[in-house]
Image (cartoon, helix red, strand yellow):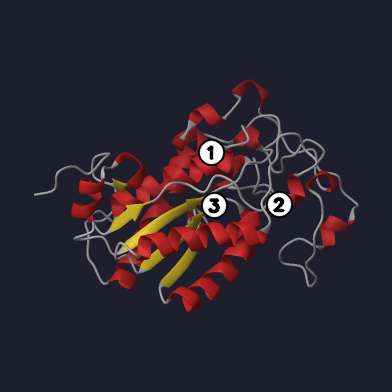
Amino acid sequence: MNRNQGTGHVYQLTDMTWEEVEDALKTVKLAIIPIGSQEQHGPHMVESCDSVLAREMAKKLGQALYPFTLVTPTVNMGVSQHHIHFPGTITLEPATLIAILKDMVTSLKQHGIKKFLFFNAHGGNQSTLNVACTTLTKDLHVDIYYAKTTASAKKAIGTYMTSKLFGHSCEREVSEALYLAPDLVRRSKITKGNIQYGGKWENLRPGHAIQGFYAYEEMTSNGCIGDATKATEEIGEKIVHEAIENLSHELQKILNVNVTSYS
C-alpha cells in the first residue's frame, strides 16, 4: 500500500518523504522536470511567470499520467539574455542550465529512473534543451525528451490567438496564467505589446530564412507582445486541457502504459 502521494493523485517530489518516494518508484517510469525562467514579462506579469506555469503544467501532466510519472523541483532560471536589459531578469549561460539538468538526471538515475521529460515554459530555453537532450541521452545512457508546455494545443491557439506576433506576456500566456496561477497577473495593468517596427529583429524571428540574436527591447519597449487585453481564464483552460491531453497521449505511447483520459 502506498503511504502517501504527497499532493493527491500526483507524485510531486518536493512534497514527499523518502519512504513515499520509495513506494512511488515501484510504478514511476518517467521524471518530469519543469523548467522556467526569471525574467521580465511586461507591466502586467510577475517575473517568475514561466517557472510557475511550468510547475503548474507539470502537476497537471503528472496527474494525467499518475502513477507512472514523478514531478521534480522546478528549475527556476533559464537562458534569458535577450531580456537582460529589463530590471530583475536573471539569466543562466546555456552550459549552466545543461549542467544543472545533468546533475538532476544523474541523481534520479541512481534511484532507478531512466526516462526524463524536460518540460519547458520559456521559449529561450528551447535550443539549449535540444542540445541537452542530445548530449545527456548519449552521455548518461538514459532516454530524454523535451516539450514546450502548451505548444501542442494547436487547435485552441489557432482559434483564439488573433495577434500576428504573440508568445510573451500576450493573450496566450496571460490566459494560461489566469487559469493556472492568477496571482501572476497584474489585472489593472494588462496592456498590448508596444511593438517597435522597422528593426533588425523583424528578419530574425522564427520562420525567417536567417535566425539570430536580438535584445527584446528592440522589438517591444514595454517587454510584451501580442494583445493581453484579449486574455481570459476560459481561453487558458482550453489551451491547457488540450495540451495536457495531447502530451499525455504521446507519453503513454512512449512509456507503453494506459491511463484514464485526462479531463
Say whether disc 2 or disc 3 marks the residue closer to the N-terminus.
3
Number of residue marks = 3
Residue 238 appears anywhere in the view: no
Three-letter code, disc 3: Ile
Residue 21 appears anywhere in the view: yes
Mark 1 Cα within 10 Å, few/some/many (few <14, many 20+)?
many
Residue under numbered circle 1: 175
User: At x 32% / y 54%, what residue is drawn?
Assistant: 70
Residue under numbered circle 3: 157
- Between marks 2 and 3, how big is the CA–CA gap? 12 Å
The mark closer to the camera, 3 or 1, is 1
- Between marks 3 and 1, how big is the CA–CA gap? 11 Å
As helix, strand or loop, the secondary structure at mark 1 comes to helix
Circles 3 and 1, Cβ within 8 Å, touching? The answer is no
Residue under numbered circle 2: 164
Which quadrant would residue 3 be assigned to in this image?
top left
Looking at the picture, how far across and down is residue 126, in whole percent? 60, 61
Looking at the picture, how far across and down is residue 260, in whole percent? 21, 56
The mark closer to the camera, 2 or 1, is 1
Three-letter code, disc 1: Ser
Q: From this view, report whether residue 154 is shown above or below residue 171.
A: below
The label number, if any, that marks residue 130 in the structure image: none
User: At x 77% / y 37%, what residue is drawn?
Assistant: 86
Say whether disc 2 or disc 1 marks the residue closer to the N-terminus.
2
As helix, strand or loop, the secondary structure at mark 3 comes to helix
User: At x 72% / y 35%, what residue is drawn?
Assistant: 192
As helix, strand or loop, the secondary structure at mark 2 comes to loop
Mark 3 Cα within 10 Å, few/some/many (few <14, many 20+)?
some
- Between marks 2 and 1, how big is the CA–CA gap? 17 Å
Q: From this view, report whether residue 218 is shown above or below residue 136.
A: above
